[in-house]
Image (cartoon, helix red, strand yellow):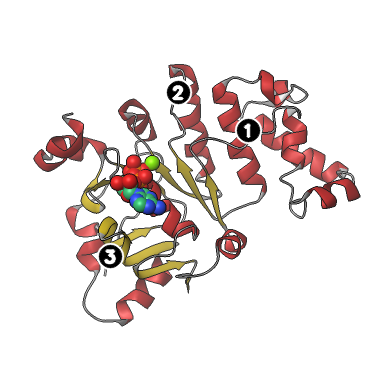
Amino acid sequence: MPAPNSIKPGNQVQFTQAERTREYLGDDPDQSRLWAERYLLFVKNLTAVFDGFKAVDIEALGVEHNELRVIIGPNGAGKTTFCDLVSGKTPPTTGQVFFDRDEITGVQEVDIARRGIGRKFQTPTVFDSLTTFENLELSLPGRQGLWSNLRRATTPEEAGQIEALLERVRLIDERDTEASQLSHGQRQWLAISALILTNPKLLLVDEPAAGLTDAETALTAELLLELRADHTLIVIEHDMDFVRQLNSFVTVLNEGKILAEGTLAELQDNPEVIKAYLGR
Ligand SMILES: Nc1ncnc2c1ncn2[C@@H]1O[C@H](COP(=O)(O)OP(=O)(O)O)[C@@H](O)[C@H]1O
Ligand SMILES: [Mg+2]
Protein backbone atom coordinates (compact mmCIF):
# COMPACT_ATOMS: atom_id res chain seq x y z
CA MET A 1 0.00 0.00 0.00
CA PRO A 2 1.53 3.35 -0.95
CA ALA A 3 1.88 6.04 1.70
CA PRO A 4 -1.17 8.32 1.57
CA ASN A 5 -0.95 12.08 1.68
CA SER A 6 2.82 11.98 1.68
CA ILE A 7 4.40 15.40 1.73
CA LYS A 8 7.26 15.69 -0.70
CA PRO A 9 10.29 17.75 0.33
CA GLY A 10 9.90 21.49 -0.03
CA ASN A 11 6.61 23.30 -0.15
CA GLN A 12 5.39 21.45 -3.18
CA VAL A 13 2.66 18.98 -2.33
CA GLN A 14 1.80 16.37 -4.90
CA PHE A 15 -1.18 14.14 -4.40
CA THR A 16 -3.07 11.78 -6.60
CA GLN A 17 -6.73 11.02 -6.14
CA ALA A 18 -5.87 7.54 -4.82
CA GLU A 19 -3.86 9.04 -1.99
CA ARG A 20 -6.85 10.60 -0.26
CA THR A 21 -7.63 9.30 3.20
CA ARG A 22 -11.11 8.13 2.35
CA GLU A 23 -9.88 6.03 -0.54
CA TYR A 24 -8.02 3.82 1.88
CA LEU A 25 -10.67 3.35 4.46
CA GLY A 26 -12.13 -0.13 4.22
CA ASP A 27 -14.82 -1.78 6.33
CA ASP A 28 -12.22 -3.73 8.28
CA PRO A 29 -12.38 -2.49 11.90
CA ASP A 30 -8.64 -3.01 12.18
CA GLN A 31 -8.23 -0.26 9.60
CA SER A 32 -8.77 2.32 12.38
CA ARG A 33 -5.77 0.95 14.22
CA LEU A 34 -3.74 1.00 11.03
CA TRP A 35 -4.64 4.59 10.30
CA ALA A 36 -4.07 5.64 13.87
CA GLU A 37 -0.53 4.31 13.45
CA ARG A 38 -0.01 6.06 10.17
CA TYR A 39 -1.44 9.48 10.91
CA LEU A 40 -0.70 11.81 13.79
CA LEU A 41 -4.39 12.71 13.83
CA PHE A 42 -7.07 10.49 12.47
CA VAL A 43 -10.83 10.84 12.86
CA LYS A 44 -13.45 8.36 11.80
CA ASN A 45 -17.24 8.77 11.45
CA LEU A 46 -16.98 11.92 13.50
CA THR A 47 -20.16 13.88 14.14
CA ALA A 48 -21.22 16.80 16.29
CA VAL A 49 -24.97 17.12 16.51
CA PHE A 50 -26.60 20.17 18.12
CA ASP A 51 -30.38 19.89 18.56
CA GLY A 52 -30.59 17.48 15.63
CA PHE A 53 -28.35 19.68 13.46
CA LYS A 54 -25.16 17.99 12.21
CA ALA A 55 -22.49 20.68 12.48
CA VAL A 56 -19.75 18.13 11.70
CA ASP A 57 -20.14 14.86 9.82
CA ILE A 58 -16.74 13.55 8.73
CA GLU A 59 -16.36 10.00 7.49
CA ALA A 60 -12.57 9.97 7.70
CA LEU A 61 -9.77 12.48 7.88
CA GLY A 62 -6.10 11.87 8.53
CA VAL A 63 -3.29 14.36 9.00
CA GLU A 64 0.26 13.13 8.62
CA HIS A 65 3.18 13.84 10.92
CA ASN A 66 4.73 17.22 10.03
CA GLU A 67 1.98 17.99 7.58
CA LEU A 68 0.39 21.42 7.34
CA ARG A 69 -3.26 20.79 6.51
CA VAL A 70 -5.48 23.66 5.51
CA ILE A 71 -9.22 23.45 6.15
CA ILE A 72 -11.40 25.88 4.25
CA GLY A 73 -15.13 26.22 3.89
CA PRO A 74 -17.92 28.78 4.06
CA ASN A 75 -19.10 30.29 7.31
CA GLY A 76 -20.86 27.70 9.41
CA ALA A 77 -19.21 24.78 7.57
CA GLY A 78 -18.12 23.26 10.89
CA LYS A 79 -14.44 24.22 10.85
CA THR A 80 -14.28 25.59 14.38
CA THR A 81 -16.50 22.79 15.66
CA PHE A 82 -14.06 20.30 14.14
CA CYS A 83 -11.29 21.93 16.22
CA ASP A 84 -13.58 21.75 19.26
CA LEU A 85 -13.99 17.99 18.71
CA VAL A 86 -10.28 17.37 18.24
CA SER A 87 -9.23 19.52 21.22
CA GLY A 88 -11.85 17.97 23.49
CA LYS A 89 -13.78 21.20 24.02
CA THR A 90 -16.87 19.47 22.63
CA PRO A 91 -17.35 15.72 22.96
CA PRO A 92 -18.25 14.09 19.64
CA THR A 93 -21.82 12.83 19.28
CA THR A 94 -20.50 9.76 17.44
CA GLY A 95 -17.20 8.63 16.04
CA GLN A 96 -13.62 8.35 17.10
CA VAL A 97 -10.57 10.57 17.34
CA PHE A 98 -7.09 9.05 17.34
CA PHE A 99 -4.03 11.11 18.18
CA ASP A 100 -0.45 9.96 18.32
CA ARG A 101 -1.55 6.31 18.17
CA ASP A 102 -4.06 6.55 21.01
CA GLU A 103 -7.79 6.98 20.89
CA ILE A 104 -8.63 10.28 22.58
CA THR A 105 -12.40 10.26 22.06
CA GLY A 106 -14.04 11.60 25.21
CA VAL A 107 -10.75 12.56 26.87
CA GLN A 108 -10.92 15.82 28.86
CA GLU A 109 -9.73 19.01 27.15
CA VAL A 110 -6.83 19.58 29.60
CA ASP A 111 -5.64 16.01 29.16
CA ILE A 112 -5.76 16.31 25.39
CA ALA A 113 -3.68 19.50 25.67
CA ARG A 114 -1.21 17.60 27.85
CA ARG A 115 -0.97 14.88 25.24
CA GLY A 116 0.19 17.48 22.74
CA ILE A 117 -2.68 19.22 20.97
CA GLY A 118 -2.34 23.00 21.22
CA ARG A 119 -4.88 25.47 20.00
CA LYS A 120 -4.84 29.10 18.97
CA PHE A 121 -8.28 30.62 19.05
CA GLN A 122 -9.62 33.17 16.58
CA THR A 123 -9.13 35.86 19.22
CA PRO A 124 -5.66 35.38 20.72
CA THR A 125 -5.17 35.46 24.47
CA VAL A 126 -2.47 38.03 25.16
CA PHE A 127 -1.94 39.99 28.38
CA ASP A 128 -1.85 43.67 27.36
CA SER A 129 -0.06 45.04 30.40
CA LEU A 130 2.81 42.55 30.13
CA THR A 131 5.72 42.76 27.71
CA THR A 132 6.16 40.31 24.87
CA PHE A 133 8.82 38.50 26.90
CA GLU A 134 6.67 38.40 30.05
CA ASN A 135 3.73 37.04 28.10
CA LEU A 136 5.89 34.13 27.00
CA GLU A 137 7.26 33.54 30.49
CA LEU A 138 3.68 32.72 31.47
CA SER A 139 3.59 29.95 28.88
CA LEU A 140 6.73 28.17 30.02
CA PRO A 141 6.05 24.58 31.02
CA GLY A 142 4.93 24.37 34.66
CA ARG A 143 3.97 28.03 34.77
CA GLN A 144 0.25 27.75 34.31
CA GLY A 145 -1.50 29.42 37.21
CA LEU A 146 -0.53 32.61 38.96
CA TRP A 147 0.87 30.95 42.06
CA SER A 148 3.48 28.94 40.16
CA ASN A 149 4.54 32.14 38.38
CA LEU A 150 5.18 33.97 41.61
CA ARG A 151 7.13 31.09 43.00
CA ARG A 152 10.08 30.85 40.70
CA ALA A 153 12.19 33.01 38.43
CA THR A 154 12.85 32.31 34.77
CA THR A 155 16.14 30.45 34.37
CA PRO A 156 18.76 31.71 31.89
CA GLU A 157 18.02 28.61 29.79
CA GLU A 158 14.33 29.49 29.67
CA ALA A 159 15.11 33.11 28.81
CA GLY A 160 17.33 31.86 25.98
CA GLN A 161 14.56 29.60 24.77
CA ILE A 162 12.09 32.51 24.72
CA GLU A 163 14.54 34.77 22.92
CA ALA A 164 15.27 32.14 20.28
CA LEU A 165 11.55 31.84 19.72
CA LEU A 166 11.16 35.64 19.51
CA GLU A 167 13.84 35.66 16.80
CA ARG A 168 11.97 32.97 14.95
CA VAL A 169 8.65 34.82 14.99
CA ARG A 170 10.32 38.16 14.22
CA LEU A 171 9.42 39.68 17.59
CA ILE A 172 12.89 39.96 19.11
CA ASP A 173 12.93 43.75 18.60
CA GLU A 174 9.68 43.88 20.58
CA ARG A 175 11.06 41.80 23.47
CA ASP A 176 10.35 44.49 26.07
CA THR A 177 7.40 46.14 24.34
CA GLU A 178 4.13 46.10 26.22
CA ALA A 179 1.72 43.80 24.37
CA SER A 180 -0.85 46.61 24.13
CA GLN A 181 1.57 48.38 21.74
CA LEU A 182 1.87 45.44 19.34
CA SER A 183 0.18 45.36 15.95
CA HIS A 184 -2.60 42.86 15.33
CA GLY A 185 -0.17 40.63 13.40
CA GLN A 186 2.41 40.78 16.16
CA ARG A 187 -0.22 39.77 18.69
CA GLN A 188 -1.11 36.77 16.54
CA TRP A 189 2.55 35.75 16.43
CA LEU A 190 2.84 36.23 20.17
CA ALA A 191 -0.16 33.94 20.70
CA ILE A 192 1.35 31.36 18.33
CA SER A 193 4.67 31.66 20.21
CA ALA A 194 2.94 31.05 23.53
CA LEU A 195 1.49 27.91 22.03
CA ILE A 196 4.86 26.75 20.66
CA LEU A 197 6.44 27.07 24.11
CA THR A 198 4.11 24.36 25.35
CA ASN A 199 5.65 22.22 22.58
CA PRO A 200 2.49 20.67 21.12
CA LYS A 201 2.79 17.93 18.53
CA LEU A 202 -0.28 19.28 16.75
CA LEU A 203 -1.22 22.93 16.48
CA LEU A 204 -4.79 23.91 15.63
CA VAL A 205 -4.71 27.43 14.25
CA ASP A 206 -8.09 29.04 13.62
CA GLU A 207 -8.10 31.90 11.09
CA PRO A 208 -4.62 33.31 11.76
CA ALA A 209 -4.76 35.79 8.87
CA ALA A 210 -8.05 37.45 9.85
CA GLY A 211 -7.56 41.21 9.98
CA LEU A 212 -3.88 41.13 9.03
CA THR A 213 -2.18 43.38 6.48
CA ASP A 214 -0.80 41.76 3.31
CA ALA A 215 2.74 41.91 4.67
CA GLU A 216 1.66 40.38 7.98
CA THR A 217 -0.28 37.68 6.15
CA ALA A 218 2.80 36.76 4.10
CA LEU A 219 4.93 36.57 7.23
CA THR A 220 2.33 34.43 8.99
CA ALA A 221 2.31 31.96 6.09
CA GLU A 222 6.10 31.81 6.15
CA LEU A 223 6.10 31.24 9.89
CA LEU A 224 3.52 28.47 9.82
CA LEU A 225 5.42 26.68 7.05
CA GLU A 226 8.60 26.88 9.12
CA LEU A 227 6.81 25.34 12.10
CA ARG A 228 6.19 22.20 10.08
CA ALA A 229 9.78 21.17 10.81
CA ASP A 230 8.88 20.44 14.45
CA HIS A 231 5.09 20.33 14.52
CA THR A 232 2.05 19.20 12.63
CA LEU A 233 -0.44 21.95 11.87
CA ILE A 234 -4.09 22.29 11.00
CA VAL A 235 -4.78 25.78 9.75
CA ILE A 236 -8.37 26.90 9.37
CA GLU A 237 -8.62 29.71 6.88
CA HIS A 238 -10.92 31.92 4.93
CA ASP A 239 -8.50 34.15 3.06
CA MET A 240 -7.68 32.59 -0.32
CA ASP A 241 -4.50 34.60 -0.85
CA PHE A 242 -3.23 33.23 2.41
CA VAL A 243 -4.22 29.66 1.50
CA ARG A 244 -2.37 30.07 -1.79
CA GLN A 245 0.76 31.14 0.08
CA LEU A 246 0.55 28.09 2.35
CA ASN A 247 0.65 25.94 -0.80
CA SER A 248 -0.43 22.86 1.15
CA PHE A 249 -3.02 20.10 0.99
CA VAL A 250 -6.52 21.51 1.48
CA THR A 251 -9.66 19.91 2.87
CA VAL A 252 -12.89 21.68 1.97
CA LEU A 253 -15.66 21.43 4.52
CA ASN A 254 -19.23 22.24 3.60
CA GLU A 255 -22.26 21.70 5.82
CA GLY A 256 -20.07 19.65 8.15
CA LYS A 257 -18.92 17.23 5.45
CA ILE A 258 -15.72 16.90 3.46
CA LEU A 259 -16.71 18.20 0.05
CA ALA A 260 -13.31 17.77 -1.59
CA GLU A 261 -9.61 17.51 -0.88
CA GLY A 262 -6.61 18.45 -2.95
CA THR A 263 -4.25 21.24 -3.81
CA LEU A 264 -5.82 24.67 -4.14
CA ALA A 265 -5.18 24.51 -7.90
CA GLU A 266 -7.14 21.26 -8.12
CA LEU A 267 -9.96 22.59 -5.98
CA GLN A 268 -10.30 25.76 -8.02
CA ASP A 269 -11.22 23.56 -10.97
CA ASN A 270 -13.72 21.51 -8.98
CA PRO A 271 -17.28 22.61 -9.89
CA GLU A 272 -18.71 21.49 -6.54
CA VAL A 273 -16.14 23.54 -4.64
CA ILE A 274 -16.73 26.56 -6.84
CA LYS A 275 -20.46 26.28 -6.23
CA ALA A 276 -20.17 25.85 -2.47
CA TYR A 277 -17.42 28.26 -1.73
CA LEU A 278 -14.86 29.64 -4.12
CA GLY A 279 -17.36 31.16 -6.51
CA ARG A 280 -19.07 33.23 -3.80
N1 LIG B 1 -22.40 24.72 20.74
C1 LIG B 1 -23.18 24.84 19.67
N2 LIG B 1 -24.53 24.73 19.77
C2 LIG B 1 -25.32 24.81 18.70
N3 LIG B 1 -24.89 25.03 17.44
C3 LIG B 1 -23.56 25.15 17.26
C4 LIG B 1 -22.63 25.06 18.36
N4 LIG B 1 -21.38 25.22 17.87
C5 LIG B 1 -21.51 25.40 16.54
N5 LIG B 1 -22.82 25.36 16.18
C6 LIG B 1 -23.33 25.49 14.80
O1 LIG B 1 -22.59 24.61 13.99
C7 LIG B 1 -22.37 25.20 12.70
C8 LIG B 1 -20.89 25.21 12.42
O2 LIG B 1 -20.28 26.24 13.15
P1 LIG B 1 -18.72 26.51 13.13
O3 LIG B 1 -18.01 25.24 13.41
O4 LIG B 1 -18.44 27.64 14.04
O5 LIG B 1 -18.48 26.93 11.63
P2 LIG B 1 -17.22 27.62 10.93
O6 LIG B 1 -16.10 27.70 11.93
O7 LIG B 1 -16.89 26.77 9.76
O8 LIG B 1 -17.67 28.98 10.48
C9 LIG B 1 -23.01 26.57 12.74
O9 LIG B 1 -24.27 26.48 12.13
C10 LIG B 1 -23.12 26.87 14.21
O10 LIG B 1 -24.18 27.73 14.48
MG1 LIG C 1 -14.95 29.36 12.72
Q: Secondary structure at mark 3?
A: loop
Question: Identity of the amino acid at label 2?
Answer: Gly
* Distance Cα–Cα, label 3 vs label 1: 39 Å
Give the numbered dot on residue 190: 1
Q: Quadrant of ligand 2?
A: top left
Q: Quadrant of residue 63?
A: bottom left
Say which mark, if any, is on residue 211: 2
Real-space Cα separation, disc 1 to disc 2, in angstroms: 15 Å
Q: What amino acid does circle 3 point to? A: Pro
Left or right of 217, for residue 272: left
**Which of the image's four quarters has the N terminus?**
bottom left
Residue 60 in percent (x, y) is at 28, 63
- Looking at mark 1, is its residue's CB closer than 8 Å to ligand 2? no
Question: Which residue is the extreme one toward the left?
Answer: 271
Q: Closer to us: mark 1 or mark 2?
A: 2
Judging depth in this view, the residue of 153 and 17 nearest the camera is 153
Residue 262 in percent (x, y) is at 24, 46
- Judging by the rendered image, the residue that carries numbered circle 3 is 2
Q: Are marks 1 and 2 in contact (CB under 8 Å)?
A: no
The yes-or-no answer for disc 2 within 8 Å of ligand 2 is no
Ligand 1 closer than 8 Å to label 3 CB: no
